[in-house]
Image (cartoon, grey):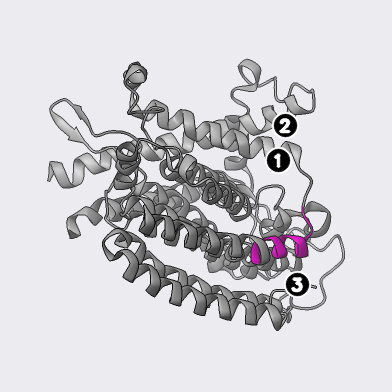
């Protein structure tokens, strides 16, 4: 009972708390980074240097009126935000955040569940979030949300192919689908897979930007054309859920990238003897450092690049990334056989 | 084997409970003052005359179908990738044949203009 229910429950609540806290500071960080790039201060009033700005925003959304438009499908309109949020959250179940820890004589696993098809689980659960977007846009029964949701889902599934294809190369290198197994494979090889597979890393990064609808691929929310995309009709807490899901997805993409390409909770160069002192820092701290570094690149890209046009976006996905990922896979397979 | 999935089931339950509880709490606190104009769908101030669920571009269906085909074929690569080391040359040649069929279909779709957006 303690081993199968209580311990996982503690780990789950810790992960959930960590993720939600990260989202809150992520939103603030985003505004701050945008501001710094544009030589502004950003939020400064609420708390020390605007530290509590997002907390205030969430509180405001919590107390706001939650409107269901008269023509909307009442049930789907309510379920859609949950269907976007829940898959984003449960993707964290298989991501190894740390080594196994022993506290108070109990053994706490470093991830919620070490399933043997971990990577497949991440890919499939990550795609489930589209249902929330599609249903949200359709249930609103309004033109902008419908168009936004169609665009959004077409974009996500287009880049999903290149991403799933490119992840195969990581499995070829590690020989396992278990997320912990992939981290250990990087320990055995002595290299992070990001160094061994720079092309795959690049494709995953571009695909990650597109799947989270971030600039330069944020067409579903292109304000000049579609108002706010699929969540135009949403307000109050249900809007907050879509917002939360979007940022959680960004963290999921970063955490998966960290696990697959940047060595997860491993310190840098774990096999180099004179760098052994880096192991003093606990694994979860390395994991957080890498994930936040990756998230920072997301924000940096947003501040730097202009938006793509929709046909350019589809051309990049279908005509460049997919052939590139197939070629990369064939080369990786060949290397595996030859070496 | 099955027991490793129990924590994931608990996670799903906790995540859903979190969402539902927060929604219910917010509804019990937030004001509800409806008016006819407020409940109208947003259309830049113009009164919507028709249902918004009209016919839309056929390309979206095309993208969805291509996604189904390519994604399912990609998933078939996963089992090979796990045991690529043991299968060695045999597995590589087999998967090369599989990928060439995939690529042939891909170029057919390209030539027929399924990948063009405008």
Kindly identify which residue carries mark 3. B117
Q: Earlier along the polypeptide chain: callout 1 or callout 2?
A: 2
Dominant SS type (magenta): helix
State whether discs 2 and 3 lie on one chain: no
Kindly identify which residue carries mark 1. A302
Q: Are marks 3 and 1 in contact (CB under 8 Å)?
A: no
Q: Position of residue A271 (x, y in %)?
A: 32, 28
What's the chain of the residue with tag 1? A
What's the chain of the residue with tag 3? B
* The residue positioned farthest toward the right in the image shown: B46
* Residue at (59% x, 55% y) in the render: A211
Using the image as rendered, state which of residue B84 and residue A220 is in the foreground. B84
Q: Nearer the viewer, mark 2 or mark 3?
A: 3
Res B82 → quadrant: bottom left
Q: Nearer the viewer, mark 1 or mark 2?
A: 1
Res A105 → quadrant: top left
Kindly identify which residue carries mark 2. A34
Q: Label 2: how many residues lie within 10 Å, few (<14), some (14-19) or many (20+)?
A: some
* Residue at (38% x, 67% y) in the render: B92
Q: Are marks 1 and 2 in contact (CB under 8 Å)?
A: yes
* Region of the chain picked out in magenta, as a range: A308-318
Q: Is residue A136 visible?
A: no
Marks 1 and 2, how far apart in space? 8 Å
What's the chain of the residue with tag 2? A
Q: Label 3: how many residues lie within 10 Å, few (<14), some (14-19) or many (20+)?
A: some
């Amino acid at each position: 009972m303690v081993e199968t229910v209580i311990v996982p429950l503690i780990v789950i609540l810790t992960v959930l708390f960590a993720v939600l806290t990260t989202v809150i500071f992520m939103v603030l960080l985003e505004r701050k980074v945008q501001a710094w790039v544009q030589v502004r201060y950003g939020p400064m009033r609420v708390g020390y240097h605007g530290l509590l700005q997002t907390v205030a925003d969430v509180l405001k959304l919590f107390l706001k009126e939650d409107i269901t438009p008269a023509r909307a499908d009442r049930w789907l309109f309510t379920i859609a935000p949950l269907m976007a949020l829940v898959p984003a959250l449960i993707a964290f179940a298989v991501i190894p955040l740390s080594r196994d820890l022993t506290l108070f004589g109990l053994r706490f696993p470093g991830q919620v569940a070490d399933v043997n098809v971990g990577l497949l689980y991440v890919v499939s659960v990550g795609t489930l979030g589209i249902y929330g977007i599609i249903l949200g846009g359709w249930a609103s029964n309004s033109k902008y949300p419908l168009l936004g949701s169609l665009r959004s889902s077409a974009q996500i599934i287009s880049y999903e192919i290149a991403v799933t294809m490119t992840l195969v190369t990581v499995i070829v290198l590690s020989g396992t689908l278990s997320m912990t197994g992939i981290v250990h494979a990087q320990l055995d090889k002595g290299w992070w897979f990001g160094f061994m597979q720079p092309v795959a890393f690049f494709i995953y990064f571009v695909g990650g930007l597109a799947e989270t609808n971030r600039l330069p691929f944020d067409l579903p929310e292109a304000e000049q054309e579609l108002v706010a995309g699929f969540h135009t009709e949403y307000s109050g807490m249900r809007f907050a859920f879509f917002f939360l899901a979007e940022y959680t997805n960004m963290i999921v993409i970063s955490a998966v990238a960290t696990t697959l390409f940047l060595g997860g909770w491993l310190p840098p160069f774990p096999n180099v003897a004179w760098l052994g002192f880096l192991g003093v820092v606990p694994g979860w701290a390395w994991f957080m450092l890498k994930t936040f570094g990756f998230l920072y690149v997301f924000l940096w890209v947003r501040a730097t690049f202009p938006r793509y046009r929709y046909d350019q976006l589809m051309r990049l996905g279908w005509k460049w990334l997919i052939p590139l990922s197939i070629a990369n896979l064939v080369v990786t397979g060949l290397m595996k056989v030859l070496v | 084997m099955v027991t490793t999935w129990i924590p994931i089931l608990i996670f799903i339950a906790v995540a859903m409970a979190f969402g539902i509880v927060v929604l219910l709490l917010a509804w019990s606190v937030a004001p509800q003052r409806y008016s006819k104009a407020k409940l109208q769908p947003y259309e830049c101030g113009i009164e919507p005359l028709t249902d918004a669920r009209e016919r839309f571009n056929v390309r979206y269906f095309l993208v969805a179908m291509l996604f189904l085909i390519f994604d399912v074929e990609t998933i078939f690569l996963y089992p090979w990738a796990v045991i690529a080391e043991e299968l060695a040359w045999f597995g590589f040649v087999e998967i090369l044949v599989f990928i060439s069929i995939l690529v042939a279909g891909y170029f057919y779709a390209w030539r027929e203009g399924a990948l063009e957006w405008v």
